[in-house]
Image (spheres, rainbow, N blue to C red):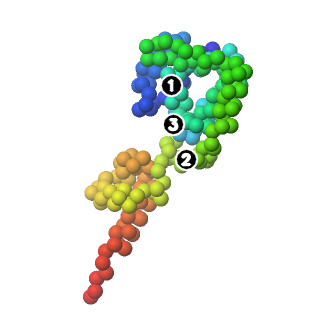
Amino acid sequence: MRFGFVRSDPALPAVDTQVRLLSAAGCGGQVIDVEAGHAGAERLDKFVQNLTADDVVCVVSLKVFGRAGRGLAQLLLSLAEASVGLSFISLNGEETLVPTTAECAALLAQLFEALPPDADQSAPPTWYGRAFTPAADFTEHQRDHVLKLYEDGASLRVIGLIFKTSPNEVMKVVTEARRMARLRRPARWS
């Protein structure tokens, strides 16, 4: 059976374009949206574990998997070890099938071992399934900008969307920015 994987990402064609290309390549109703975040990655891993040797995974790019480095090598190795085919569909509809041979699996195993461990093996912090920037990672300039937006009436949610963080983290940044602003003010003598 052929399964198509799509993902919404600025580096990829629009999702409807990906679906159209994969459907034309024979995936039909078996097109799966690879969602962002830790939960989406877990669902993808569970799905890949259930694939059999007769299955083929079709994608327009490896970016669909949302992984890089060692994580991507591990996913490809899992596909190769299960003898699952991997097919790339170009924007003009041409298909390139990667063979699932023992040599391919051995090469991917070597690649996996050669890559350095990912910088952070733990899952990134998430808010409703989306990765976010912790308050501790904001620069002084960003903290000041967050405080200005907040004092101008922007909601925590809107500020969070701008800085790709959760409203709770925005409030931490606002609190820290106010504290730093008080420390920068000169003391008044009465």
Q: Is residue 105 left or right of residue 98?
A: right
Callout 2–callout 3 Cβ contact below 8 Å: no
**Which residue, given by chain and number where applicable, does mark 1 sit on?**
61
Which amino acid type corresponds to the residue marked 3 in the rendered image?
Ala
Q: CA distance from mark 3 to mark 1?
A: 16 Å
SS category of the residue bearing label 3:
loop
**Which residue, given by chain and number where applicable, does mark 3 sit on?**
36
Q: Residue at x 58, y 15 (%)?
A: 97
Q: CA distance from mark 1 to mark 2?
A: 23 Å
Measured from the top left, where is residue 15 in percent x and y?
Answer: 44, 25
Dot 1: within a 10 Å radius of its alpha carbon, few (fewer than 14), some, or many (20 or more) residues? some
- Quadrant of the image occupied by residue 169: bottom left
Q: CA distance from mark 2 to mark 3?
A: 12 Å
Measured from the top left, where is residue 94 in percent x and y?
Answer: 49, 12
In the image, farthest residue toward the bottom? 190
**Which residue, given by chain and number where applicable, does mark 2 sit on?**
124
Q: Which image quarter holds the N terminus?
A: top right
